[in-house]
Image (tube, grey):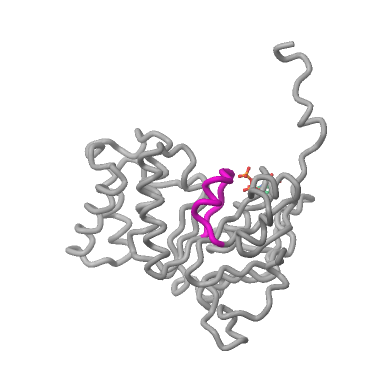
Amino acid sequence: MESATTRPAAADDPDAGGPPAALRLSGLHKTFGANTAVDHVDLVVPQGSFFGLVGPNGAGKTTSLSMAVGLLRPDEGTSQVFGVDVWSDPVEAKALIGVLPDGLSMPERLTGRELLTYIGQLRGIEAGVLAGRVQELLDVMELGAAERTLVVDYSTGMRKKIGLATALLHGPRLLVLDEPFEAVDPVSAAALKAILTGFVASGGSVVLSSHVMPLVEQLCDTVAVMAGGRVVAAGPLAEVRGGGTLEQTFVRLVGGDEQGRRGLSWLAS
Ligand SMILES: Nc1ncnc2c1ncn2[C@@H]1O[C@H](COP(=O)(O)OP(=O)(O)OP(=O)(O)O)[C@@H](O)[C@H]1O
């Protein structure tokens, strides 16, 4: 199994003369009081890869991704997007990234169309281009029918979809998506998968976190497993899962205590 920290010099390594990685995390570290949420994490997301970040609850995925995209300042370490440092050069870096954060907060008393138009104007997208993109995104996300619904009244899945639409609007080169499929219905999920695989096929790069192992196996070519704030395995999907499924590998790496497996003695007994 290959560790992201010990990856050999590859085409995505500028030191090897190749293009810079889509995302390179070096020594990222974050504590909350006495709790170390992310413990000196190194990760390389090669350009053109579909990268899955998995790990149990509290592993540090959201904290890592928040630091990676410039939403949460690390205590130590750096995050580079296509060679641009996210924290020292945020404007250039953020133009390259589309982000779907965990618990996205949006201006809620707007319709989906108004919200996308507003975000697009903030991004400086020319009016004619913006109107076309907004329409396409509403169609693809199947949010057109909710034309007059305010975002505050959206369901959880609809909020996920409008959040993803805002992440795609400016045509980023890297998408960083925290649990993008959570609460999204199967029809919309199929549409999202098609958008994301098409994006990667045309040269884009995607990092997503998910708890749904079959989904990660279906979409991702590269994965990292986090536990206790550390990366415990990373590399091409086939190498990380070895002969088994990703779920089997995950359970083997991350464990889970005996108490949890025994269940509740008093329930349905
Ligand atoms: N703002 C915060 N203040 C204090 N502790 C935090 C904060 N954010 C995260 N943590 C802690 O940091 C650790 C990592 O949390 P994080 O949300 O990054 O995990 P995660 O892998 O995304 O979990 P999940 O899969 O449940 O979303 C946890 O112990 C969590 O309680």
Q: Total marks drawn?
A: 0
Q: Position of residue 103 (x, y in %)?
A: 50, 44
- Quadrant housing the C terminus: top right
Left or right of residue 250: residue 152: left
Give the residue furthest to the bottom: 17
Give the residue furthest to the left: 128
Give the camera-side residue of 82 and 216: 216
Q: Position of residue 218 (x, y in %)?
A: 51, 51
Give the camera-side residue of 140 and 93: 140
Left or right of residue 14: residue 40: right
Give the camera-side residue of 240 and 192: 240
Q: Position of residue 80 (x, y in %)?
A: 56, 73
Left or right of residue 53: residue 262: right
Position above or below: 212 against 203: above
Q: Position of residue 196 (x, y in %)?
A: 41, 57
Position above or below: 116 against 159: below
Q: What's drawn in magenta, residue-wise?
A: 207-221
Give the camera-side residue of 142 and 87: 142
Q: Residue at x 47, y 72 (%)?
A: 93
Q: Residue at x 23, y 61 (%)?
A: 130
Residue 179 is a magenta residue: no
Q: Residue at x 61, y 86 (%)?
A: 16
Give the residue furthest to the front: 243
Give the residue furthest to the right: 258
Image-quadrant location for residue 154:
top left
Left or right of residue 194: residue 125: left
Residue 215 is a magenta residue: yes
- Quadrant housing the N terminus: bottom right
Position above or below: 96 against 133: below
